[in-house]
Image (spheres, rainbow, N blue to C red):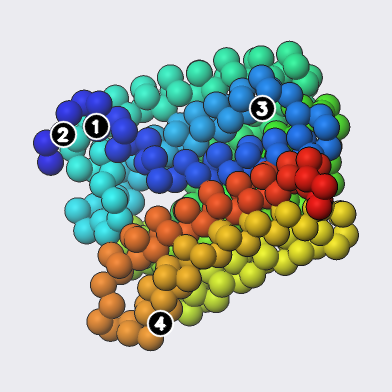
Amino acid sequence: MSVTRTRAWILATRPRTLSAAAAPVVAGSGLAAGDGVFAQFPALAALVGALLIQIATNLANDYYDFVKGGDTGDRLGPVRVTQAGILPPEAVFRGMVITLALATLTGVYLAWVAGWPVIAVGLLSMLMGVCYTGGPYPLSYHGLGDVFVFVFFGPVATAATYYVQAQVWSPGAILAGAGLGAFSTAMLVVNNLRDRETDGAAGKRTLAVRFGDTFSVVQYFACLVLAGVVSVMGVVMMEWSPWTLLCLAGWLPCLPASSRVLAVTREPETVDRRTLNPALGMTARGVALYGAGLGVGALLGATSPFG
């Protein structure tokens, strides 16, 4: 596959996955704005840092999956630049290190603004991002990827975004993070359902490999339902503005995705799992809409006479 160097690095960053990193920051910043504690520069730095950590994690996955044999020519998902020979492994590894260094610089500013808790969150997030596929006990190879995604793309990212602006931990932001974590986990479920057979052959023991297709389909819908339940709990228990229910628009792109997910169990012998690639993109758009709905809804609740 022949592509320009710029295009190769864009492919390596996996732009479609970045909504999972941006959505918690948008939601956390919207909740901060609704509470009157929004801070422009810490919010922007949190967004840049989250995107850099996500990109570094993607590069780490690309490199370590290739080195460990998790990516082969039978891969069904989008192109991985190392496995496809578009970029050499050493270059991808260096890209990961450079991206982590840039994320660290962003973290230095946020630590100056908000203190040592940001250092702990940032270092742990970067470490877990690399350990997702790297290190002596890679999380995704032992069925722990779902836990990682739920925690770090949910409560950790959302609550930390609120914290760097307000210097207090918000129960509401933690709850919102649970919804975002569930939605982001749904993205991972689609990914692992698509790759169940190739992952199993490579020794990658995801939950889809361990428990099968039906489990993964149920898990997908459970994640979407949990995200919806969280939004209702926020309005009822946390006194969020009803405008935050705009986040339920995140379900809309998941409706066509759901039919593709269900087809895996309805037609297990004939379905082409590549059809789950669009479902993954649809679910990613759902994450973006969910985070935007929470953030914009919280802001509207604070500024609208009907909030």
Q: Considering only order in the chain, which callout, 2 or 4, is on the residue closer to the N terminus?
A: 2
Instruction: In the rendered view, tell whether residue 276 sits above or below residue 150.
Output: below
Instruction: In the rendered view, tell whether residue 152 sits above or below residue 43.
Output: below
Instruction: In the rendered view, tell whether residue 78 sits above or below residue 53.
Output: below
Q: Is residue 210 left or right of residue 173?
A: left
Residue 278 position within the rendered picture, expressed as x and y whole percent measured from the top left: 34, 61
Residue 6 position within the rendered picture, expressed as x and y whole percent measured from the top left: 25, 26
Residue 250 position within the rendered picture, expressed as x and y whole percent measured from the top left: 56, 59
The foreground one among 217 and 84 is 217
Observer-side mark, 3 or 1, equals 3
> Disc 2 and disc 3: Cα gap in Å?
35 Å
Q: Considering only order in the chain, which callout, 3 or 4, is on the residue closer to the N terminus?
A: 3
Residue type marked 1: Arg
Residue furthest bottom as drawn: 266
Residue at screen point 60% across, 54% down: 290
The foreground one among 243 and 52 is 243
